Amino acid sequence: MVTSASMTAMNENTTMNETPQSATVTDIVERKTKLGGATVGNVRSEHPFMVAEDVNVWYGDNHAIQNVSLEVGKKEVIALIGPSGCGKSTFLRCLNRMNDTIDTARVTGNITLDGKDIYRKEQDPVALRARVGMVFQKPNPFPKSIYDNVAYGPRIHGLASDRAELDDIVHSSLERAGLLKEVKDRLDEPGTSLSGGQQQRLCIARTIAVNPEVILMDEPCSALDPIATARIEDLMDELCEDYAIVIVTHSMQQAARVSKRVAYFHLGLLVEVDETDTIFTNPQHKLTEDYITGRIG
Amino acid sequence: MNKNQTTRQKVEAGLPRRRRKEFLFRSVGMLATAVGIVFLGVFFASLIADGSTAFKQTFLKLDIELSEDTLAPDGELDLAYADFDGLVRSALRDALPEVSGRSDRRELYRIVSIGASYQVRDLLAANPELLGTTQTMWVPASSNVDMLIKGNIDANVDAALRPISDKQIAWVQALQESGRLATRFNTALFSNGDSREPELAGIKGAVMGSLYMLVVTLALSFPIGVAAAIYLEEFAPRNRWSDLIEVNINNLAAVPSIVFGLLGLAVFINWVGLPRSAPLVGGLVLTLLTLPVIIIASRASIKAVPPSIREAALGLGASQMQVVFHHVLPLALPGMLTGAIIGMSRALGESAPLLMIGMVAFIVDVPGSLADPSTALPVQIYLWADSPERAFAERTSAAIIVLLGFLLVMNLTAVILRRRLERKW
C-alpha cells in the first residue's frame, strides 16, 4: 500500500516538472542521499514526553520510514505534514503500536513514553493504547448508542466503579468534546445517526473518556466540512491544555492554526521540524519550502 | 470513421448501437426470468396436482360387533391373538349381504385395509369396557379402492389391466350409494410411520428423524463453524498452513455429499461403533457436510465488518478478544445465522449420505430418541417413489410438499432473523 502511495507521490512530482525550480525525481533522490536521515531544524522539545529515536518501519520489503527521531512535548500540539505516502500516518501508528496489527509491519528504533520504551517485551499494547488514544481519519463510531460509544473505553478498562461514575465520565467527556449540548437528550440514539462532524467529536469524546496522556489524530478533519473542522480545531486548542496531541494533516492552514510545532515528512524521511512560525515563514530545507509553497504535495 | 466528425457526432453515431445492445440484454434477461418462473410454476402445479389428493383418504363405515364369542372365546381378551380380522370381515358381510360364495367374499375382504383390524384393536386396547357392544367405525378402505374413488384407477379399462375387479367396483358403488363410503382428511399421513400398505403409510417417522438430525447438526455445526471462522479470520497467523486450511475448507464444500456418507459409515459406525440408521449418526454426517458452508459464510460476514470498527476498538485499548466479541461478532452474526440456516436447509434436503449409513431402511416405528433407527424426509421420498403401488405416487408428492414447506419455513426464519438482528445493529 505504501509502495504504491510513494510511487504516486513520485509520479506527482515528475508531472510537476513544468516549472524549473520544482523538485524532479533525481533531485529528490539526490537530496535524500545528501540528507542521510539527518533532520533539519530542532527535533527536541522543551518538555519531552514521547520520544522517538531512529525509528525505522518496514512493510514487507518496503522501507516506509527511515531513521526518524522526534520528541513530542507535554501539552503541545505537533502537526505532521507532508505529501501522501510520506510515512506520517505510519509514524503516528508507531506511537500507539497500531502497526502491530499489520502482519508484515516491522518497527525498529526506540520509542519511549514518559521515559519507558513502549516496544519493550513487558509492554502490553492494550495498556499502551489506553494511555495513547487515537482519532481516525473517517469518523468511526461503534454501531451502538451515543452513551455506549463513550462508555465503551471506561467499561473495558474498568474505570468506573458504578453506574453514576460512568454517567459522570460519559457526560464530562461529551462536554469536553463540545457535544453534550447537542446530544444530551438522545444519548440512547445510535452514534451513527449523528452528522459527520458530530460523529468525529463523538470519537474524540470516546477517546478522552479513557483519559489518555497523548492523543493521536490521523487527519481528523479530512472528511468534514469547514464549519465542523473549525469546531474540531477549537476543541484541539482546549484539549492541548491537558494532553499532548500529535496530528497528521494535509491542510497546511490547519497545521498553522492548531500546532505549536510542525514536522515535515518526505518519502519516509523526517525532513524538517521546527516551531510552526519558523516552518511557515522561514523553512530551512528546500523540500519543506517547495511543499509549503505548493510546488510539491 | 470520418476524422472530420466532431466528438458530439461520434457519440451520437454510436448511440443506436448502444441502445440496441441494452435492449437485447434486457430482453434476454427478461426471457431467462420468464423461463425460470414457468418451470417453477409447472413444478409446483404438478406437485400440488399429484400430491394434494394424498391429504384425503377413502374410509368405509362399518358396524363392528365386538362380540365376546369371537374376541374372547375362553372368557379372556388377548389383544395379541384376538381375531380382529374376523370382526371386520363379518361387519363387511353385513354391510353387503348380497355377496355370497367363498371366492366372492375373499374378493370383498380386499376392499378394506388391514388398518381396519388395527383400528379395532386400538379401540379395544384403549376402552376394554366396549367389549360386547357394536361400534360404528370409519375404517380405511384399501388403497385400490382409494385410487378408484380419486380417479387414479380408470374403471373403463380392461379388468385384467387394473388392480380392482368389476365386482369390487360394483360393491364400492353400492357402499357409496348407501352412504357407507366417504373421503376424509388423511390423518394417517401425519401420525404414522412408514408402511407397506400405502393407505397406512405416513411421514411422521421421517419427519421426526429429520428433526432429530437437524438438532444434532445445528448443535454441532454452528458453534464449531463459527469458532473456526473466528479463529481463522481473527487470530490465525497468515502463513502456508492457514492457506492450506483455507483451500481445503473451500474444497470440502464442493465434495459430493455421498462421500461424507462413506466417511460417516467408516468412522462413526464401523470405528466408533455408533448404531446404524440412527439420527445421531445422520446428524454427525450432515455436520461434516454443513461445516464448510457455515465456515465460509461466517468468514465472509466477518470480513464484511468494516475495519474502521476494529481500529476504533483497538485504538481505545480493547484486546483482540474484546474486539471480536464486542464488535465483530454482533455485526457478523446476522450473516452467520443466514449461512447456518442455508446450511441446515441443505442438510435437510440431503439423501445420498444417509443411504450410506443405513437410514434408507424400511422403518415402521416413529423414532423416540437419537439412537433409534429412523429415516429422513428426502429418503422417505426416495423410498416411496421406488414403491410399485399406485397410491405411493401421490404420497411421494405429498411428502415433497411437506419437505418444501419445511425448507420454506427455514428460509423465512433466516430472512426474519437477519432483518431483526440487522435493525438492532
Image: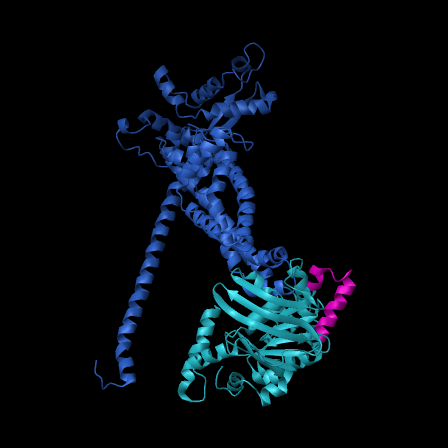
Chain colours: A cyan, B blue
Q: Image check: A189 left or right of B403?
A: right
Against B198, residue B47 (above or below) is below
Q: Per the image, is A10 magenta?
A: no
Measuring from the top left, give residue B150's x and y in whole percent. Answer: 38, 37
Q: Quadrant of residue B330?
A: bottom right
- Of A183 and A171, nearer the camera is A171
Measuring from the top left, give residue B248's x and y in whole percent. Answer: 44, 47
Residue A58, visible in the rendered structure: yes
Q: Quadrant of the C terminus of chain B?
A: bottom right
Q: Main secondary structure of the magenta part?
A: helix
Q: Quadrant of residue B67?
A: top right
Against B309, residue B391 (above or below) is above
Q: Per the image, is A175 magenta?
A: yes
Q: Residue furthest top?
A: B74
- Of B141 and B44, nearer the camera is B44
Against A108, residue A74 (above or below) is below
- Of A148 and A84, nearer the camera is A84
Q: Which residues are magenta?
A: A152-176
Measuring from the top left, give residue A270's x and y in whole percent. Answer: 56, 76
Residue B180, visible in the rendered structure: no
Measuring from the top left, give residue A121's x and y in whole percent. Answer: 64, 58
Q: How many marks?
A: 0
Residue in the image at 32% along x and 28% along y: B163
